[in-house]
């Protein structure tokens, strides 16, 4: 059984399209019908997270953000190479994020690309073609994540405030959905699935 924290990193790029695309005759493409990389603004962030006391059932926290910072110059590949990581693949989250007090509620679907080479992180041609994305969960279900921003989770008053805000959010959304902690052991990719 796991009895210690599991640490992992994520690199997240937020893709923002131009609000009003140029007329079709003036639009530059990259050969696949999509906009060129120069027309996209991508804010890259590096996140260092952990799953505290995974598998023990002693924590009410499923995951926590330890540190997040922006990648200067938006050159994600060079930055990750310098840390010793290699790019493998990517997935796409499409959906919405809602904010209420300290609470953040993310409602997304997870997609994978079918028309582009997933090993090329700067090929954004799939963004122009809705049918080039395929749902990973064929049922069409959404991934819902509720979280609270707490400055220091080692202070019990902060934990209590964060917990009360999550309970308040859970009660508010009870007619629509059930918010409950997931099994932390299920979040560990090293553990066999049930």
Image (cartoon, rainbow, N blue to C red):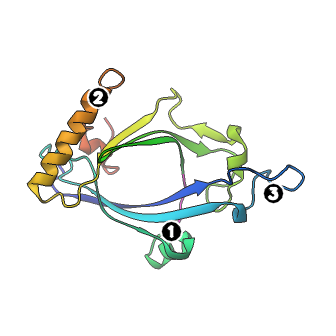
Query: In the structure shown, which secondary structural element does the residue marked by tag 1 occupy?
Result: loop
Say which quarter of the image contains residue 168.
top left
The residue where tag 2 is placed is: 172
- Say if 172 sits above or below 146 in the image: above
Q: Is residue 164 left or right of residue 49?
A: left
The stretch in magenta equals: 86-90
The residue where tag 3 is placed is: 29
Q: At x 51% / y 26%, what residue is drawn? A: 139
The label on residue 122 is: none
Of circles 2 and 3, the one toward us is 2
Label 1: how many residues lie within 10 Å, few (<14), some (14-19) or many (20+)? few
Say which quarter of the image contains residue 30.
bottom right
Residue 194, image x, y percentages: 31, 35
Residue 84, image x, y percentages: 44, 75
The residue where tag 1 is placed is: 86
Query: In the structure shown, which secondary structural element does the residue marked by tag 2 occupy?
Result: helix
Is 20 or 40 nearer to us in this picture? 20
Mark 2–mark 1 distance (CA, rounded to whole Å): 42 Å
Residue 2, image x, y percentages: 19, 51
The extreme front residue here reads: 101
Mark 2–mark 3 distance (CA, rounded to whole Å): 45 Å
Q: Sequence-wise, which precedes: disc 2 or disc 1?
A: 1
């Amino acid at each position: 059984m796991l009895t210690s924290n599991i640490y992992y990193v994520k690199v997240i790029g937020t893709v923002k399209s131009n609000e009003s695309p140029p007329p079709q005759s003036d639009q530059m493409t990259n050969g696949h019908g999509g906009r060129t990389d120069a027309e996209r603004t991508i804010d890259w962030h590096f996140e260092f997270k952990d799953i505290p006391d995974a598998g023990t059932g002693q924590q009410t926290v499923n995951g926590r953000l330890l540190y997040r910072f922006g990648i200067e110059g938006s050159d994600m590949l060079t930055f990750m190479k310098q840390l010793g990581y290699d790019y493998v693949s990517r997935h796409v989250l499409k959906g919405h994020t809602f904010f209420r007090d300290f609470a953040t509620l993310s409602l997304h679907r997870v997609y994978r690309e079918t028309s582009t080479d997933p090993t090329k992180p700067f090929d954004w041609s799939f963004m122009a073609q809705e049918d080039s994305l395929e749902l990973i969960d064929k049922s069409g279900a959404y991934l819902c994540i509720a979280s609270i921003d707490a400055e220091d989770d080692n202070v019990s008053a902060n934990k209590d405030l964060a917990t009360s805000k999550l309970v308040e959010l859970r009660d508010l959304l009870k007619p629509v959905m059930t918010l409950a902690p997931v099994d932390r052991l299920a979040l560990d990719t090293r553990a066999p699935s049930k």
